[in-house]
Image (cartoon, rainbow, N blue to C red):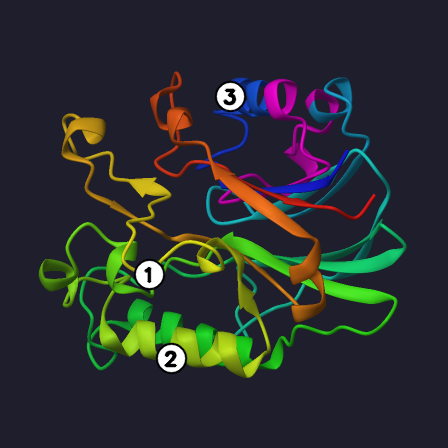
Amino acid sequence: MPFTIATWNINSVRLRMPIVERLLKEHAPDVLCLQETKVPDELFPEKAFRKAGYEHILFHGQKGYHGVATVARRPIELVEKRRFCEIDDSRHLSVRVQAGGKSVLVHNFYVPAGGDEPDPEINRKFRHKLDFVYEMNSVPASEDELSASILVGDLNIAPLEHDVWSHKQLLNVVSHTPAETTNFEAMRKAGGWVDLMRLNVPAEQKLYTWWSYRAKDWEASNRGRRLDHIWSSANLVPSFKGYEILQEARGWEKPSDHVPVIARFDLD
């Protein structure tokens, strides 16, 4: 069986635990990285994960907002809960997991959304987002003969033209503005990260992982954005066997506006 890793902005893990359990039962990823868990560490639903077969659990949370968690069916070791931009808002967690004879460093990120106004001079949330992405330049895709890196999460930026339903109409909408996309792609390339979701998918093909709650019929309108990402160090590319965007999860009961993305590696 391959090594699988999933990423999902769950938009409150306690509220949506039934669909998390469904994902674990039906797809059983080796590692699941959650964002926007919205729960302080002392109230994280560990028992539910253990009951589902996920005994290895690490989290970095706070009450009501943000938060990330990484759970696994195999041992994971805490590396860091990093504070970005000198703000302790629970947006990063890194762990190590053994797979295929390699020590894999897994970064789990929840990048700030950035508010509504794409002007850092008048919108401090947008300024925070740009600063956060700039600071991510210090997170390289470390690799050697016995180690590798994976970076996943809700990065809240759709960098490419066809990562949104309308490039033209969204150029001045937060998540797809040139200020975000240019710096985002520069950061990814400078760190040596490979965008696995676009590795074998043509740039002109639409890819979405998020559909707004505001749409009366999200599936019919299909006005999505690719805000969730899976990157790796270059030495994992030969082992990468593809990924799945679970679009059907957007239609599950009490869904998140994001859907899970599951990547497969031939590492076992």
Res 147 → quadrant: bottom right
Q: How many angstroms separate mark 3 from mark 1 (CA)?
A: 31 Å
At label 3, the amino acid type is: Ile
Please tell me whether mark 1 sits on a helix, a strand or a loop: loop
- Residue 22 vs 58, above or below: the answer is above
Mark 3 highlights which residue? 19
Residue 99, image x and y in percent? 83, 49
Please tell me whether mark 2 sits on a helix, a strand or a loop: helix
Q: How many marks?
A: 3
- Residue 31 vs 82, above or below: the answer is above
Q: Is residue 48 left or right of residue 83?
A: right
At label 2, the amino acid type is: Asn
- Part of the protein shown in magenta: 24-48
Q: Which mark is residue 4?
A: none
Q: How many angstroms separate mark 2 from mark 3 (CA)?
A: 34 Å
Q: Is residue 129 left or right of residue 242?
A: left
Please tell me whether mark 2 or mark 1 is closer to you in this view. Answer: 1
Return the residue found at the far left: 169
Residue 103, image x and y in percent? 85, 59
Quadrant of the snapshot with the N terminus: top right
Q: Nearer the viewer, residue 243 or 180?
A: 243
Residue 56, image x and y in percent? 81, 37
Residue 135 in view here: no
Residue 231 in view here: yes
Q: How many angstroms separate mark 2 from mark 1 (CA)?
A: 18 Å
At label 1, the amino acid type is: Ala
Quadrant of the snapshot with the C terminus: top right
- Residue 126 vs 55, above or below: the answer is below
Query: Residue at 30% across / 70% down in the picture?
Result: 126
Instruction: Using a 10 Å C-alpha cutoff, classify the residue at mark 2 as few (fewer than 14 neighbours), some (14 to 19) or many (20 or more).
Output: some
